[in-house]
Amino acid sequence: MRCKFCDENRPLIKAHILPAAFFTFNDARILSSSPEVHPKKSRIGVYDENILCAECDGSFGLLDQHVVEKILRKEGRFHSDGEFGLRHYIDAASEIVRLFALSVAWRAHHSTHAMFANVNLGPHEGPIKRDLLNPIEHRKVSAFVHEFDHRNIPIISPIPERYDKVRFLRIYAGRLILSVKVDQRPMPPDLDYLDLLTNEQTISIVVPWTGSAEASLAIDIISGSEHNRRLANKWRKENASDDPMSVFRISIGRSKFPSN
């Protein structure tokens, strides 16, 4: 079959959309808001067999490894101005982090997995792919990173979002949130200092998980079917009475937040 990245006819492999490390910390399960879908164990995360050859997957793996080692497993240098917090990841190369975010968006676009069913980069797939293929001569696509203040939370499906009318794709990766610009308009000025395309530092805004729309969505999905409620009750009794959300690392099914 033809690899969607190098366009060569090569054997395709099971390629992760998000690095496996994002799923190996807990006994993760994939949930769906559909009552007909039973919870599924997902110790190695979400992968697709119809996107990448081994060589291209290996090139993405270098990006994955950098982010896992330099951000996911690090605390970062935290500081706050009283309104919100920031984490500065000194050892994380901003260009590698940018390419990682673009690679996840590109993989999600081509994936047939239900978790990424609502991801469609449209005309922006081409520029993102060109950035990934030739990041020296073609550096066009902006991205930035923010994160929740809780390390052990569910992973939900990507959603489209807007900042000052500029469109982004928001991708959830554990506590990390990857925002990739999918718009021809320039980066909103308020986000310039976070733009991985133009800054040499990797800085992440820290946002609260408790009370967030994402927390409401995850709870809504968990309580939305008998299968999920049964699993949640079992987990509370047996393993995590103080952290009943920890088993639900992935929540699939809805791309829109419930209204408050």
Image: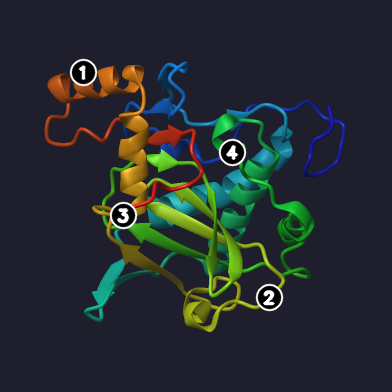
As displayed, is residue 242 above or below residue 72?
above
As displayed, is residue 256 above or below residue 39?
below
Residue toward you, 226 or 126: 226
Picture quadrant where residue 114 is located: top right
Q: Earlier in the sequence, mark 3 or mark 1?
A: 3
Q: Earlier in the sequence, mark 2 or mark 1?
A: 2
**In the image, is 7 to the left or to the right of 206?**
right
Q: Earlier in the sequence, mark 4 or mark 1?
A: 4
Q: Earlier in the sequence, mark 2 or mark 4?
A: 4
Q: From the top left corner, tell me how far across and down residue 166 is, in percent.
A: 60, 70
The structure residue drawn at horizontal position 33% and vertical position 26%, both measured from the top left corner, is 27
The structure residue drawn at horizontal position 67% and vertical position 44%, both measured from the top left corner, is 109
Crowding around mark 2 (Cα neighbors within 10 Å: few <14, some 14 to 19, many 20+) is few
Badge 4 amino acid? Phe
Badge 3 amino acid? Ser
Badge 2 amino acid? Arg
Looking at the rendered structure, which numbered label has been put on residue 116? 4
Secondary structure at badge 4 equals helix
- For marks 3 and 4, give the one nearer the viewer: 3
Secondary structure at badge 2 equals loop
**Residue, disc 1:** 234
Q: State if disc 4 and disc 2 touch (CB < 8 Å).
A: no
Badge 1 amino acid? Lys
Q: State if disc 1 and disc 4 touch (CB < 8 Å).
A: no
**In the image, is 49 to the left or to the right of 255?**
right
The structure residue drawn at horizontal position 62% and vertical position 42%, both measured from the top left corner, is 108
Q: Quadrant of the N terminus?
A: top right
Looking at the rendered structure, which numbered label has been put on residue 212? 3
**Residue, disc 2:** 185
Q: Earlier in the sequence, mark 2 or mark 3?
A: 2
Q: From the top left corner, tell me how far across and down residue 102 is, in percent.
A: 62, 56
